[in-house]
Image (cartoon, grey):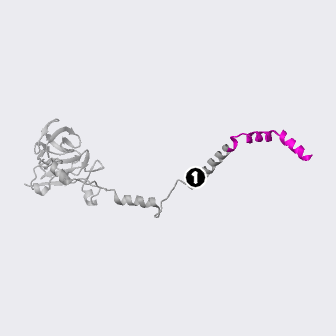
Amino acid sequence: MENENKNQNSESNPKVQWWKSLLGKKWTFPAIYLVASVLIVTILWTRSDTGNYQLTKDDSLFNEQQEIVQEEPISAEPSLDIDGLEAEYAGEEAVPVIGEEPKIMWPLEITENAEIVRQFYDQAASREDRIQAIYEYQNTIYTSSGIDIIKGGERFDVLAVADGKVVMAEADVLHGNKIKIVHEDGLETVYSSLSSMKVEVGDQVAAGTVIGQAGKSEIKKDLPNHLYFEAYRSGEVVDPTSILPALHDERT
């Protein structure tokens, strides 16, 4: 009696009726089998593939790659067919690629009484040399960006040190008359403390051309007639003696 009541209750339960209806269909079990198979394969594949497969020396793939590297090494330098290049360019004249620097001379005729009385200020020079490259004007200390040259205290002709074009010829209150010449190879030269000028802006001058006469300047009253000579390379000031010939080679 109790079993009959349980069966009646089960049959009247909607969930039980739904499962019985589902299991009674022909495609139910094949579908369940297919889904289970997919899940099992996915789990096995995920556990076996970590994404970081490492080769060991016993692995056949490792040995195959090692053999390939040994047979086809990567060369750092491509091979050149020297014989072929020589044959291709035989008979052609070599073209020089380095231009000649402008010939530089001293900005005055060097004689026994010509001397540099104040050198270019070099921060890396000795303390003694740095002291010799400074001067005072109105209680202010200045460093020399060029060299001061005298010739026995007398006036002398000032010469262009190389071929070039005059781009400045003007009077300067402190430094006297001043001339700037632009040369080749980024070189510029400046001539100050001139008592007179013999060129104008725009003039083309050759090396050795007389461009003025040395004189005195307000800022360097301690010096007799002299030339203050500066040099610039690509806009940067340089020690003039680094571009000039050795002084002892120029004496006459």
User: Is 2 contained in the magenta span?
Assistant: yes
Q: Is residue 52 above or below residue 182?
A: below
Residue 117 lies, with reference to residue 56, above or below; the image says above
User: Who's the residue at 81% across and 38% down the image?
Assistant: 14
Q: Is residue 154 left or right of residue 219?
A: left
Residue 149 lies left or right of residue 79; in this view the side is left
Task: Mark yes or no: residue 229 visible.
Answer: yes
| Front position in the image: 45 or 77 | 45
Q: Is residue 36 magenta?
A: no
Residue 113 image point, x, y percent: 11, 55
Instruction: Tell whether 86 sits left or right of 72.
Output: left
Position of residue 35 relative to residue 52, above or below, is: above
Q: Residue furthest front?
A: 26
- Which residue: 64% across, 45% down? 34
Q: Main secondary structure of the magenta part?
A: helix
Question: In front here: 204 or 147?
Answer: 204
Q: Which residues are magenta?
A: 1-29
- Residue 204 lies, in percent from the top left, at 13, 38
Q: How many marks?
A: 1
User: Which secondary structure, mark 1?
Assistant: helix
The quadrant holding residue 193 is top left
Instruction: Locate residue 209, reporting x and y percent.
Output: 10, 43
Name the amino acid type tagged 1.
Trp
- Res. 222 in view: no
Q: Nearer the viewer, residue 225 or 133?
A: 133
* Image x and y of residue 93, in percent: 12, 47
Residue 211, quarter of picture: top left
Residue labelled with disc 1: 45
Question: Hey, which residue is sitting farthest right in the picture?
Answer: 1
Q: Specify the farthest residue to the left.
A: 252
Query: Looking at the image, which residue is at 11% across and 56% down?
Result: 249
